[in-house]
Image: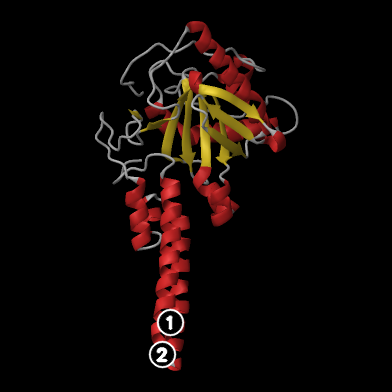
Amino acid sequence: MSQLVNPYDAPQPAAGLDSDEHVVLQKLRDLGLQWNPAVDYQLATLFPKLSGIGHKGDIKARHKMLTKLEPFLQGALADGEQVQYVGVGTQNKFVEQYFMGAVFAALINKTQFVLTNLRILMVHVDARGNPRFPIWAVFYNQIATFKKKLLGEMHLTLSDGSKYKYGGFKGPDRKQMPLLVEQSRQAYAEMGFQPQVTQPRENLCSNCFQVVPVGQLECAPCGQKFWKPTELAIRSFIFPSWGDFLLKHYLIASLELFGYALSWLFYIALIAGGVRDGGVGVAVLVVLGLLIVQHSFDAAMTYFIAKKGLSPKGSGG
């Protein structure tokens, strides 16, 4: 369990919504599913679909999701912090979808929401649901609204006016998550619970899961260092895909590298044509211009992606 730098008393867990813990326990036993006693779960709210068509598949899918998250949860949860609900969605970023394509944009924006009695933990997960980085935390009093919009998109608005849009949540998630968030917001208000923050959506260290205050690039408790977005962007400008490899977006970086290698076949052919036609100087200038544009574009995208959260240097995260 994580020990918070500034200990505080968390609100009591929210009451169950549509299910009873005893029913959930029996369902899990009937399906032969085990849970980790080292993680404090509020089972009454974790499994919203306990009957009807497809309920067994939904229970198994959520159990599998929790199993993948448990190593992260064991390190990230504070003493007394209880997991109430989990759901996974994809942050919708128009610029990334436009320039990278929806599939690749989804790979870097898939976000696991873990609603606890204390806060919302948000962690980037890979295509298989394994936790990666960046990692964020939001206290409930920092949430202005969390609502379902048209076509099922979820909109999160924080106290400073920053807005985040997420798609891909399952139907039960779109129903239960806003209810639980509102319950916790009301509990905070009734208790007068006002935890100190440096920004509404705090960055967490990917090594020890402590808060890294806004503007800092080193975790005080464990010493983990993080990249400046400009450092990664410069590396991508020098050699496209370098910064993306450091961000550990290996699939995207490999495809970028492959595309970059293919582009050099075109550049070589262009220069060769200039040599043959006596216009090598013009051909070289054209190639240099294209390279500057290509490298600048990759650097800009790397910077845009790296600005979202903290990316550890070395093996952290």
The answer to which of 21 and 116 lies nearer the viewer is 116
- Colour treatment of the image: secondary structure
Q: Residue sitting at 44 percent across and 18 percent down?
A: 81
Q: Which amino acid does label 1 sit on?
A: Ala
Quarter of the picture containing the N terminus is: top left
Instruction: Tell whether 251 sits left or right of 56.
Output: left
For residue 285, what is the image quadrant?
Answer: bottom left
Check residue 1 in the rendering and tell me which mark sits there, or answer none: none
Instruction: Tell whether 173 sits left or right of 292.
Output: right
Quarter of the picture containing the C terminus is: top left
Rendered location of residue 288, percent (x, y)? 39, 73
Q: Do the CB atoms of the residues marked 1 and 2 lie less than 8 Å apart? A: yes
Instruction: Tell whether 75 sits left or right of 148.
Output: left
Query: Would you say residue 33 is visible in this rendering?
Result: no
Rendered location of residue 60, percent (x, y)? 60, 33
Q: Please, what secondary structure does the residue beneath circle 1 have? A: helix
Rendered location of residue 310, percent (x, y)? 37, 39
Residue that label 1 marks: 283
Q: What residue type is labelled 2?
A: Val
Q: Residue sitting at 46 percent across and 35 percent down?
A: 123
The answer to which of 258 and 278 lies nearer the viewer is 278
Residue that label 2 marks: 275
The answer to which of 145 and 244 lies nearer the viewer is 145
Tell me which numbered mark, 1 or 2, is placed earlier along the sequence: 2
Q: Please, what secondary structure does the residue beneath circle 2 have? A: helix
Query: Would you say residue 51 is visible in this rendering?
Result: yes
For residue 179, what is the image quadrant?
Answer: top right
Number of dots carrying numbers: 2
